[in-house]
Image (cartoon, helix red, strand yellow):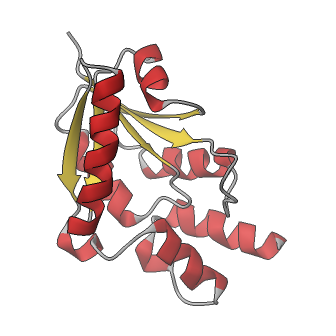
């Protein structure tokens, strides 16, 4: 039986921390689906399509990783894809409390579902998409915080505004 895992997030934009988690998870599971969430309550910098394209470029060397998008309940997407594992990245203890709550809710809604937490490398522990967007909007150098494909998409999005 193939071990299929979903790595969900907004990925607005994909950071080097996200990419670190994807690369490490790709060694642990047979198939990884990076699932870009469609959330109408948020006002993202990048479109879902732009986020997906930058992720696809960043993971092109990883043969067992693919990109998709979803809206609604994550557990419904997980079931549709035949996965039983959700991957979540942790940067610091502050992340754990929220992620623990989400994992517990998902397990309550789908008892066979497991959540696997992967710590980002310490050198990426300060990164978040929110920080990257703030640095970018204020004209700072964000290029070393994101993969090249994400940097390109951020620059394109900021030039449109």
Q: Residue at x 66, y 59 (%)?
A: 44
**Quadrant of residue 46 within the rendered picture:** bottom right
Asked if residue 121 shows in the view, the reply is: yes
Q: Residue at x 27, y 67 (%)?
A: 94
Count of marks, rendered view = 0
Looking at the image, residue 76 lies above or below residue 140? above
Asked if residue 92 shows in the view, the reply is: no
Q: Residue at x 66, y 51 (%)?
A: 50
Q: Which of 15/94 is in front?
A: 94
Q: Residue furthest top?
A: 1
Q: Which of 159/36 is in front?
A: 36
Looking at the image, residue 56 lies above or below residue 44? above
Quarter that holds the C terminus? bottom right
Q: Residue at x 45, y 52 (%)?
A: 58
Residue 99, how many percent across, how many down? Answer: 30, 50
Residue 27, how many percent across, how many down? Answer: 18, 39
Residue 55, how many percent across, how many down? Answer: 50, 49
Q: Which of 22/127 is in front?
A: 127
Q: Residue furthest right?
A: 160
Looking at the image, residue 25 lies above or below residue 73? below
| 33 left or right of 92 in image | right
| 9 left or right of 97 in image | right
| 71 left or right of 40 in image | left
Looking at the image, residue 41 lies above or below residue 111? below
**Quadrant of residue 115 within the rendered picture:** top left
Quarter that holds the N terminus? top left
């Amino acid at each position: 039986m193939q071990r299929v895992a979903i790595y969900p997030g907004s990925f607005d934009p994909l950071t080097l921390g996200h990419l670190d988690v994807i690369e490490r998870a790709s060694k642990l599971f047979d198939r990884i689906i990076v699932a870009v969430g469609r959330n109408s309550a948020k006002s993202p910098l990048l479109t879902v399509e732009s986020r997906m394209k930058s992720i696809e470029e960043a993971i092109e060397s990883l043969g067992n990783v693919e990109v998709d998008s979803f809206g609604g309940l994550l557990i419904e997407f997980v079931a549709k894809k035949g996965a039983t594992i959700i991957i979540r990245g942790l940067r610091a203890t502050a992340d754990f409390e929220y992620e623990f709550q989400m994992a517990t809710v998902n397990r309550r809604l789908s008892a066979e579902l497991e959540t696997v937490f992967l710590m980002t490398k310490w050198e990426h522990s300060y990164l978040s998409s929110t920080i990257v967007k703030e640095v970018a909007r204020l004209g700072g150098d964000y290029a070393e915080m994101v993969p090249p494909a994400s940097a390109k998409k951020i620059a394109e999005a900021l030039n449109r505004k």
